[in-house]
Every structure is written in C-alpha cells, then in structure tokens.
Amino acid sequence: MDGPDGSEERKTFEKFSDRFRRIYPGYLLDKKMHVVAGPDQPVINLKQLQAVLKSSDEVLWENSKWMFDGE
C-alpha cells in the first residue's frame, strides 16, 4: 500500500492477503476466514498418523516420513 506521504515507513505496509500468502504458502482462507490447505498441500489424516505412531512396521514409517519435520 502506498501512503499519501510516500515515507519509507509506509512502504513497509502490506495487505493482509499478501502477507498471509507470503508467510503461509500453500494455504488458503475460506469465506469464513478459516485457514485451509491448498490443493497441492499435503494433509495429515489423524487416523493414519495414529496408526504410524502405534506401528512397528518399518515400511509404514518410511512411507510416512513426510509427515514429520526434518529430514
């Protein structure tokens, strides 16, 4: 947003929608302003997560590594 005074401070302002997209790429706001995952954003199924955490199956763990932070 450009302020009428053109000061440097005014140039640092940004619209909420622009800031949201910058900080949370891959997420969207619905009509009620709820944060929802975008179509390309992977989502975690809580039942699947529970099954992974309870399981000792190594293959299941390898397939579910994307759910956890880090490498």
Image (cartoon, grey):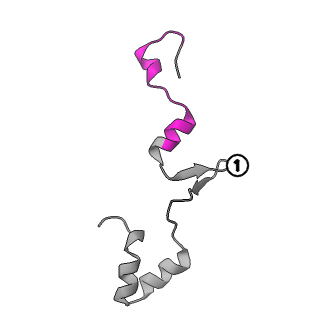
Residue 19 location, x and y as percent?
50, 38
Residue 63 quadrant: bottom left
Residue situated furthest top in the rendering? 5
Amino acid marked by disc 1: Lys
Residue 20 location, x and y as percent?
52, 42
Residue 71 in the figure: left or right of residue 12: left
Q: Nearer the viewer, residue 65 or 10?
A: 65
Residue 58 in the figure: left or right of residue 29: left
Viewport quadrant of the C terminus: bottom left
Badge 1: residue crowd in 10 Å (few <14, some 14–19, many ≥20): few
Residue visible at 35% across and 80% down in the picture: 62
Q: Nearer the viewer, residue 63 or 44?
A: 63
Residue situated furthest right in the rendering? 31
Residue visible at 54% across and 74% down in the picture: 45
Residue visible at 36% across and 86% down in the picture: 59
Residue situated furthest front in the rendering? 40
Residue 34, compared with residue 66, is above or below; it is: above
Q: Mark 1: which secondary structure?
A: loop
Residue 65, compared with residue 42, is above or below; it is: below
Q: Nearer the viewer, residue 4 or 26?
A: 26
Residue 38 in the figure: left or right of residue 70: right
| Total count of labels | 1
Residue 64, compared with residue 16, is above or below; it is: below
Is residue 46 magenta-colored? no
- Highlighted magenta segment, given as a residue range: 4-21
Residue 34 in the figure: left or right of residue 6: right
User: Which residue does the numbered mark 1 point to in the structure image?
Assistant: 32
Residue situated furthest bottom in the rendering? 56
Residue 57 location, x and y as percent?
38, 90
Is residue 13 magenta-colored? yes
Residue 12 location, x and y as percent?
44, 25
